[in-house]
Image (cartoon, coloured by chain):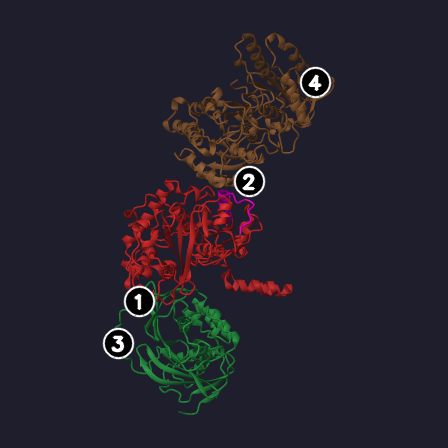
Amino acid sequence: MTEPRRIPLPELGSLYRKAALDAAKSKLSTTGSLKALPQRPVLAEHPGITEEQAEAYRQLVHGEVFDGVHRASLPSVLVHIAGFPVQMALMSQREFPLPLLGMVHLSNHVHHHHPVTAGQPLQILARAENLAPHRRGTQVDIVLEISAAGQLLYSSTSVYLGRGSYLFDKPDAAAPREDFTPPVKTALWTLGAEAGRDYAAVSGDYNPIHLTGLTAKALGQKRAIVHGMYSAARMLEGREPEGAGHQWSIQFAAPVALPGKVAFAAEQVEEKVTRFTGWNPRRAKPHFTGELILP
Amino acid sequence: MAETVREAVIIGGNRIPFARAHGAYAKASNQDMLTSALNGLVARYGLQGQQLGAVSGGAVLKHSKNFNLVRESVLGTPLDPKTPAYDVQMACATGTEAIGSLANKIKLGQIDSGIGGGVDSISDAPIVVTDELRGILMEANRAKTLGARLKALAQIRPGHLAPQAPGTGEPRTGLSMGEHMAITAHQWGITREEQDELAAASHRNLSATYEQGFFDDLVTPFKGISKDNNMRGDSTVEKLAKLSPVFGKDLGEEATMTAANSTPLTDGASAVLLGSEEWADAHDLPKLANFVDYEQGAVDFVDGAEGLLMAPTYAAARMLTRNNLSFEDFEYFEIHEAFASTVLAQMKAWESAEFCRDKLGLDAPLGSIDRSKLNVTGSSLATGHPFAATGGRIVATLAKLLHGKPGKLGFISVCAAGGQGITAIIEGR
Amino acid sequence: MAKDSYTEFANTGFGRRITKALGLPQPAKLRRYSPGDPVIEGPVVLVGQSEASDLIAGRLLDWDLDVRRHVGPKEKVAAVVAVFDSAHSPANLSESVLELGGLLKQLKPSARVITVFRNPDHTEDPAARAARKGIEGLTRSLAHEMRAGGTANGLILHENLDPAAPSVAGALRFLLSGRSAFVSGQFITVDSVNGTLPEDWSAPLRNQVAVVTGAARGIGAAIARTLHRDGAQVIAVDIPAAGEQLTQVANQVSGTALQVDITEQDAAERILAHAEQHYGRLDIVVHNAGITRDKLLANMDAGRWDSVIAVNIESQLRMNQVFLDSELFSRTESTVGPRIVSLASTSGIAGNRGQTNYAASKAGVIGMVSAASAQLAARHGTINAVAPGFIETEMTAKMPMATREVARRLNSLSQGGRPEDVAETIAYLVSPAAAGTSGLTMRVCGQNLVGA
């Protein structure tokens, strides 16, 4: 592995503006895309997640209070939020082969090794791996490694799909879709039209696809859709251990259109393993599946 | 209970007829209704000018202006204004908890008399503004200058103005109580037929009990209503079978819960007068029954490991063990019919050797409950269920049923939101 | 209650001149009792010299009244008590009658004339009975002649009754006081020495427990309030459907509310059980509950007839039997036993078109009361009826305006009575000071022209 390129902590707004510009450019020249991933990871110093951010996150998910004593360990999704601009910076590099705008989040696998606390300065490293064909484009793994003072606290692999960007030959038709039988629901999420804007306000991820029906339409969605990681946040809320050491994952299927309802089930499949399912309660179509493995 | 404590006696009760929401009581507030129930109790037992030990009660859905609901209601009655009053809240078990805790105070000699009860109004439910609007208004309120205030108010957007009515959804799951119960009912294999039978019986029993004049000294009319207006005395299983399910619709063909075998949203209030034996005698008041014991329970329902409304199964096990009693020792059973399936699922759980062993930690199942002793004067499916008022209805009704049957026992089970519940024992005298 | 604007108008200075000039009725503002009022203010003139007259004078003096045998020609007079107990023949009424007549022009507003005489039915001497009946006729006619809220009533003593009997005093005091404001042209009979006078005339019913049926509204509520004011503990009874108003009444009078339909077979048992539980006694029963289901007899159906009979008279007969069979109600304390008052009606006396069922039930009450007095007498108790005339209630407020206006003026006081007027008479009849009076039907009608 090569030495990471040190960058200042990126600001998401400017990345999106750049992405829009790039999208316009790529329309001009759709050929000649790179087929190789940038070899150099990027590394940014993060001053630490603030208590205000933690509180805003708590209000968003109606979660438990971070009092710094009994509950000091920040939730994984908030750590992901801290690392997300670095992922974005990596993907918005000129040499990155897939356009940032219209990138679809396919899954997230997280190993939350140790607690991350508020105010703790973090080193966030992002790198790209496994550029691979997908039936609807090309997928890529973005790995995040978040450390403090040399100790790895959190690592994750986010799989993104560059939809419609066929860098490889189109794979054969998809495997036949398995019939989805919803489990017994344990909760029902009622998401208002503002759910995307609310998550954006907390995460800084103002991807227009989440904001309004109009901006979503411009990006090819009928209605605004909720951030995938919002579902992860709701899924994990109140379930992560204070001492960390847990692993979790989420695979996204159909996006959740706003406003909307998500039927949700949490099933304990083994002593330390909980399986999650989120689906459309009307059409019994899955939105996501997930898993939490306690240490 | 230990031998040293004294008896807490149920002297009598009063309630206003329960009315379907947005109907007869649409313009009545919680305070109006609770005051009326208390006034009726005061009139029935001649309590004008009396200073009682305490009045305890509450409402599940409450305006913030009603922060002192019970006290304000007491001040509107002829009771001595020196009577202390306080609000309690345990969802649908509010009334039962209010009564149980007063009984304990009486047993301990802290007070000699008290009134426990509750009230709820769906029609007068507090409408809340969105959190955003509330934040803006609070900011404007805090602003020190006109400019700052206008700046704060300028943030208001049309979308902020949509009011938010409180729902019956569980905050932690977002599922309505009916949806939760539909899951539990399905898990316990409760059939549509047995639910409809229970619902029809509830209406039949309530109607027959009114006919006998049984409620003449338990109910005082309000706003021109003299009987629970949800009651359908001509209800039959055949009629109920025609209704479509309203809960658990994602179960498709296996959905069983209809509007008739679920309680409707209801407005109403109730109150129960309690006292020590000495106090009752000194005031020439009747002694219907003793409030023997009660137990709270709660289950971890959030991830579906337990049914939301199954907490009374646990409370019952502990309470019966503590009192060395079994179901055979009871003359009457009052199991609150939040839904027909709630009653049936609880009874099925008590019959299940597996559930009683694995969950309740019992050597043997608690056993079955004789249906002829169950909800003999009708229950919530027929009367309706104004959340906090149900406990007072059940306690007063059961006490009157047991009056004149010294030593005979009655069993109460009331489930509540948040995976909670209360069971209680009362003894006739 | 409908507002009697005419009476209000006629009581203004301008209104008085107008109504007088037009020869319209001149309803006066009646002197009504409130606690603390003196029995009557001003001279009370005694007419007629006899032992009874002297005893009565002594009684009135005990009450600190300004008792006179004579008054000056210009002096205002509050009341005249004319004692005729020694009248043996119509011929010897003249002196006292003319003396009485001479005083009438000196009467104050809301004055009282009370004639006192022996019971005509108790003498077989034709001349004596003629004389006594003559006083009755005189009293009734005088009642029509009284002005400015004044009333004339008679007090009829049993042939052998000691005029010092408590109930003579009780009746005199009632008739003199504002309690009898709407009672005129009536006769109170005193037949026995039963009864006791109260220690405190402002609380004549102290320590007494009374049940009032139909207490949720109107006259029943007024009865409950008046009995409470007079010191009684009140059990307010009404049908369960009237419970909300019943609660208010019970709470106003610091009593207890009992929701029971009096036509239920066990109604009396439930009332007794309630009285026993809460008070340990029951002294007074007021049968006030009643219904009307008006229809010409030609159009009468079983539902209307039977329900009126069931509520207004059958229930009372059944309940009285249970009450009288009970130890709680039948026990006697010294010379005062259980007391019952039933609501009759002037319709029951005079009849009323469209009210055959109601009139039958109310005449039935009058019959029941006269027949049951013997049963009660055995227990030192009393049973009486009160027949209200036109009373301003929610019920009469629903009458058509013109009918109501005519009904109001059709009596010697030219106005409707109030529920309190009926209640005052009942409170008097159930008081220990009226224990010598039983079997009577007293009208509270302002001497209604209808029916006598």
Looking at numbered disc 1 in the image, what kind of residue is underneath it? Pro
User: Disc 1 sits on a residue from what chain?
Assistant: A
B129 left or right, relative to C18? left
Q: CA distance from mark 3 to mark 2?
A: 86 Å
Q: Amino acid at mark 4?
A: Arg
- Mark 1 sits on what residue? A182
Give the left or right position of residue A284, taking residue C263 as reference.
left
Q: Is residue C386 left or right of residue B426?
A: right
| Circle 3/circle 2 CB separation < 8 Å | no
**Tag in front: 4 or 3:** 4
| Quadrant location of the N terminus of chain B in the rendered image | bottom left
Give the Cα separation between the discs numbered 1 and 3: 25 Å
Q: Which residue is mark 4?
A: C69
How far apart marks 2 and 1 lie (CA) works out to: 63 Å
Q: Are marks 4 and 1 in contact (CB under 8 Å)?
A: no
State the brown chain.
Answer: C
Residue of label 3: A173
Give the letter of the chain under mark 3.
Answer: A
Q: Position of residue A217 (x, y in %)?
A: 41, 69
Tell me if mark 2 has few (under 14), some (14-19) or many (20+) residues whose alpha carbon lies within 10 angstroms of its own. some
Q: Is residue B179 above or below residue B222?
A: below
User: Which amino acid, by three-letter code, is at mark 2?
Assistant: Gln
For the colour red, the matching chain is B
Bounds of the magenta segment: B33-52
Question: Which tag is nearer the camera, tag 3 or tag 2?
Answer: 2
Q: Are marks 4 and 3 in contact (CB under 8 Å)?
A: no
